[in-house]
C-alpha cells in the first residue's frame, strides 16, 4: 500500500481525478449541439430528455443536474441554455455546490443554432487549453469518493468480482476514503446483514427503513418484481431469487462498518462506507453517484455492460473469464480467475485497489477510451423497479 | 479443477464452476453427488435434500424457499425455488 494519489484540488476543498470540460445542455432541444461539440473536441457532453418541466420529479432532477454539473472531476462546465429563469437557478446552484469555472451560451441571445455550436465549441477549446496547463498535485485518501456498482450480474458476481471489490473497498475505507454502495433493489433480502454493520444503531434503522420504504412503494404499485428482478439475464446466469442477487451484490461493500445512509445523489459528509438509496438501473445509479460528487466508480459485470460516465471514470471488472475474453475492450480487470482457481480473492482485491489508484492518477479506463458518456435522469415513475 | 463451489458449510446448495452433465458423479470435499439434470456453469445444485417450503441456504443465509421437494444432485433454480420477498404470492 505504498501507492499515493494525485489529483486536482478544487476551490471548495473537493478533489478531481480528471480535469474535464463538460458541455451541459439545460434543455433537451440543445442536446444535439452538445453531442456535436464532444465529437469535435476533447470536451465531454451529456444528453437527456428533460425539457424544463416542473413536475413531481423536479426536485430530483434539479439535484441531479446541479450536482452533476459541479462534479469535482470537472474543470469547467459550459451550459447551453434557452435563457429561462429556471436554467439560471440550476447554474447558480451548481456554483454554490463548488463549480468554479463556467460559461453560459444562450441560444435565444445568439439567435442561431449554428452560431450556438460555434461559440460553445470555441469556449470548450479555450477551457481545454487552460485545463491542460493545470498540474496534478499530491492529494489525501479522503479526497477519493468511490462508487460501488454492479450490472449484468451472474451467479459468479457474488463469488468473484463483488467480494474482490469488497476487499478493495475495505482497504480504501481503512485509509480514510469514502466508499458508497447503491442499488436499494439489490440489498433487499440482505439489509439485515448490512444494518448489523452500522456504526450507530440509527444508521442500521435507516438502512432497514430505506428498504422497507422501497418495498412498500412496490407493493403499493402492485408490481410483481419477479419480472424485473432478478432480470432475465440474471436468471440465465444462474441467479434464482432477488435475495440471492442481493446477498451477492452486498459483497461489493466488503466488511467495513456503515457510517451513514445517503438519499439519492446526496454527497457523503465525511470519510467512511455509506449506503445510497438509488434505483437499480445502471445509468441512473451512475448518474446519481456523479451528482453526489463521487469521483471514481468500480462496476462489476458478469454479462458485459459498456456503461460509462462523461465525468466519472468507471472501471469494469468482469466476474468470469469468458466475458473478459469475449469483449476485451469493455473490461479493465478480470476477477473470473478466482473461480478458475488461478488467483485468490485477496490477490484480485489488491489488483482492483491498484487499478483504482492508477485510474485516479490518470490511467484511462476502457469506458473512457470507448468515449462512453451515458447519462439518465431518474424519475420516480416508471423506472424505479428496473 | 473443482467443479463445485460450496460457500458456507451450512448451505444446502453449491455453485457449479463448470457445466455439469446429467448422470455424472462429483466427488469433492467429502461429498459424493450424482448429478440428476444438466446444470449450466454458475447455476446451483442441491448438496442436501430440501423439503417443500424449506429455506434454500446460500452464503449461510436464506435466499428463498423450495416450492417442491428437491433431491441431492438436482438443479436448484426458478422451477423449484421462490424468493420469500416481493414475489407474486405477496403482491396483492
Image (spheres, coloured by chain):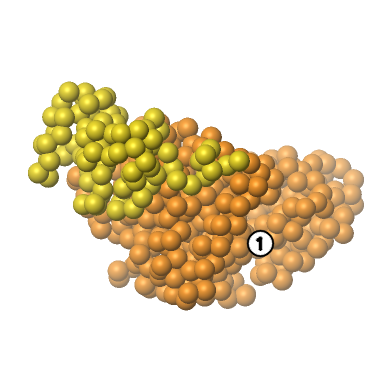
Chain colours: A orange, B yellow
Chain where mark 1 sits: A
Q: Residues within 10 Å of mark 1 (few under 14, many from 20)?
A: many
Which quarter of the image is occupied by the C terminus of chain A?
A: top right
Looking at the image, residue B15 lies above or below residue A139: above
- Name the residue nearer the viewer: B59 or A365: B59
Q: Position of residue A193 (x, y in %)?
A: 40, 61
Classify mark 1: helix, strand or loop: helix
Residue A236 can be seen in this image = yes
Q: Residue at x 39, y 51 (%)?
A: A247
Position of B65 with respect to A102 (left or right) is: left
**Residue at the (48%, 47%) spot, across then down:** B85
Q: Is residue B47 left or right of residue A367?
A: left
Does A191 sit above or below residue A13? above
Say which residue appears at 67% left-offset and 66% top-offset: A99
- Identify the residue under disc 1: A67
Residue depicted at 74% across the width and 59% down the height = A59
Residue in front for this viewpoint, A209 or A152: A209
Residue A55, how many percent across, how many down? 80, 51
Image position, residue A87 (x, y; %): 81, 57
Amino acid at each position: 500500500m505504498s501507492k499515493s494519489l494525485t489529483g486536482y484540488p478544487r476551490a471548495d476543498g473537493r478533489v478531481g481525478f480528471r480535469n474535464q470540460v463538460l458541455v451541459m445542455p439545460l434543455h433537451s432541444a440543445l442536446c444535439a449541439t452538445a453531442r456535436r461539440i464532444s465529437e469535435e473536441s476533447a470536451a465531454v457532453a451529456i444528453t437527456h430528455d428533460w425539457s424544463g418541466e416542473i413536475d413531481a420529479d423536479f426536485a430530483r432532477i434539479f439535484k441531479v443536474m446541479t450536482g452533476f454539473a459541479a462534479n469535482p472531476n470537472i474543470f469547467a462546465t459550459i451550459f447551453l441554455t434557452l435563457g429561462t429563469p429556471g436554467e439560471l437557478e440550476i447554474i447558480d446552484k451548481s456554483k454554490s455546490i463548488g463549480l468554479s469555472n463556467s460559461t453560459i451560451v444562450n441560444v435565444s441571445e445568439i439567435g442561431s443554432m449554428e452560431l450556438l455550436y460555434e461559440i460553445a465549441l470555441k469556449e470548450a477549446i479555450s477551457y481545454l487549453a487552460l485545463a491542460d496547463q493545470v498540474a496534478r498535485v499530491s492529494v489525501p485518501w479522503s479526497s477519493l469518493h468511490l462508487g460501488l456498482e454492479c450490472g449484468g450480474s451472474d451467479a459468479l458476481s457474488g463469488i468473484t468480482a463483488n467480494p474482490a471489490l469488497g476487499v478493495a473497498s475495505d482497504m480504501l475505507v481503512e485509509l480514510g476514503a469514502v466508499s458508497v454502495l447503491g442499488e436499494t433493489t439489490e440489498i433487499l433480502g440482505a439489509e439485515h446483514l448490512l444494518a448489523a454493520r452500522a456504526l450507530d444503531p440509527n444508521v442500521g434503522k435507516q438502512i432497514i427503513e430505506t428498504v422497507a420504504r422501497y418495498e412498500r412503494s412496490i407493493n403499493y404499485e402492485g408490481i410483481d418484481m419477479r419480472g424485473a428482478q432478478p432480470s432475465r439475464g440474471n436468471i440465465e446466469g444462474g441467479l434464482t431469487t432477488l435475495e440471492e442477487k442481493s446477498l451477492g451484490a452486498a459483497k461489493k461493500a466488503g466488511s467495513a462498518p456503515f457510517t451513514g445512509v445517503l438519499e439519492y445523489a446526496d454527497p457523503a459528509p465525511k470519510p467512511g462506507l455509506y449506503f445510497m438509496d438509488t434505483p437499480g438501473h445502471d445509468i441512473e445509479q451512475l448518474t446519481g453517484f456523479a451528482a453526489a460528487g463521487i469521483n471514481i466508480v468500480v462496476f462489476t459485470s458478469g454479462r458485459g455492460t459498456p456503461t460509462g460516465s462523461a465525468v466519472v471514470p468507471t472501471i469494469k471488472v468482469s466476474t468470469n473469464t469468458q466475458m473478459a475474453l469475449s469483449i476485451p475492450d469493455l473490461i479493465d480487470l478480470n476477477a473470473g480467475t478466482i473461480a478458475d482457481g488461478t488467483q485468490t480473492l485477496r490477490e484480485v482485491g489488491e489488483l482492483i485497489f491498484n487499478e483504482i489508484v492508477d485510474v485516479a492518477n490518470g490511467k484511462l479506463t476502457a469506458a473512457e477510451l470507448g468515449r462512453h458518456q451515458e447519462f439518465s435522469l431518474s424519475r420516480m415513475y416508471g423506472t424505479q423497479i428496473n | 479443477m473443482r467443479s463445485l463451489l460450496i460457500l458456507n458449510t451450512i448451505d444446502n446448495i453449491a455453485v457449479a464452476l463448470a457445466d455439469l452433465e446429467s448422470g455424472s458423479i462429483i466427488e469433492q470435499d467429502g461429498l459424493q453427488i450424482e448429478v440428476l439434470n444438466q446444470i449450466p456453469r454458475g447455476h446451483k445444485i442441491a448438496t442436501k435434500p430440501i423439503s417443500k417450503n424449506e429455506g434454500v441456504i446460500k452464503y449461510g443465509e436464506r435466499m428463498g424457499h423450495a416450492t417442491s421437494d428437491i433431491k441431492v444432485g438436482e438443479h436448484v433454480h426458478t422451477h423449484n425455488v421462490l424468493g420469500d420477498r416481493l414475489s407474486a404470492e405477496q403482491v396483492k
